[in-house]
Image (spheres, rainbow, N blue to C red):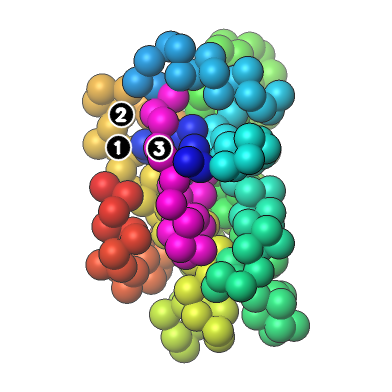
Amino acid sequence: MRILYHFPTSPFARRTRLALAHKGLSFELRDSRSHPNIQAEARRLSPLKTVPVLVEEDGRVIGDSTAISHYLDRAYPSAPPLWPTGPEDAFALFELAPLVDVVQNGLADLGARYYALHTSEAWGAVKAEAMDRVQRALDALAQRVSALSRPTVARSGWSAADMWLVTMEHWLATLPQRATQFAPAAQIVSLGWRLPPEISRWADQHRDRPEVKALG
């Protein structure tokens, strides 16, 4: 059985689950936060020491959600593509996806991985520069989805770019609620970013998709 090590609330893991569903691939979920042994196993399997981690049926291991998605397109070419290759669709997808990663990586780094440094004299300048990039990326995403004349980023339909954006929006929108019980979420919220309403309105079109609802 194919195995995916994940965190239930991680947007990187959630978009990988959507990618596997899009490809019609079955897999067993293992929550790396449910038991120390599972997290240790995931870290042992991948030198990245992050989730998601995908273990194929033949035992091959690959980490990083973007790398996993490109691998899936090449390993299962007869299944619906995650990254359409037509020039216009490819441009739209590869322009949008890095903006999502700027947001998620920037907030995760500042609000979780490196937050212990927030008492440093350099923190203010580092935070200001990073948060400027994050907010500029969010505003750019809002502009792009507002300009769409269709529900999906690609003309050919639901793709990795939509999965990236849907899971990012959900993560950001639910962080304030999670902040009351989860310190890293509170730290990320405290950074002062703003989720443009245009992104949430765009995501509303996809909340009832079966694979999105299955994420919980």
Q: Which residue is the site of mark 2?
A: 179
Place residue 10 in its image quadrant.
Answer: top left
Place residue 192 in its image quadrant.
Answer: top left
Mark number displayed over residue 29: 3
Q: CA distance from mark 3 to mark 2?
A: 25 Å
Mark positioned earlier in the residue sequence (3 or 2): 3
Mark positioned earlier in the residue sequence (1 or 3): 3
User: What residue type is disc 1 on?
Assistant: Pro
SS state under label 1: helix
Q: Is residue 111 above or below residue 85?
A: above
Question: Callout 1 environment at 10 Å: few (<14), some (14 to 19), or many (20+)?
Answer: some
Count of numbered labels shown in the rendering: 3
Return the residue nearer the eye: 41 or 110: 41
Mark number displayed over residue 176: 1
Question: What residue lies at 25% left-to-right and 36% top-to-bottom?
Answer: 177
Question: What residue lies at 63% left-to-right and 18% top-to-bottom?
Answer: 44
Q: Is residue 125 above or below residue 89?
A: above
Q: Report x, y in % for residue 156.
A: 55, 84
Question: What residue lies at 51% left-to-right and 42% top-to-bottom?
Answer: 2
Q: Report x, y in % for residue 136.
A: 60, 55
Return the residue nearer the eye: 5 or 213: 5
User: What residue type is disc 3 on?
Assistant: Leu
Q: CA distance from mark 1 to mark 3?
A: 26 Å
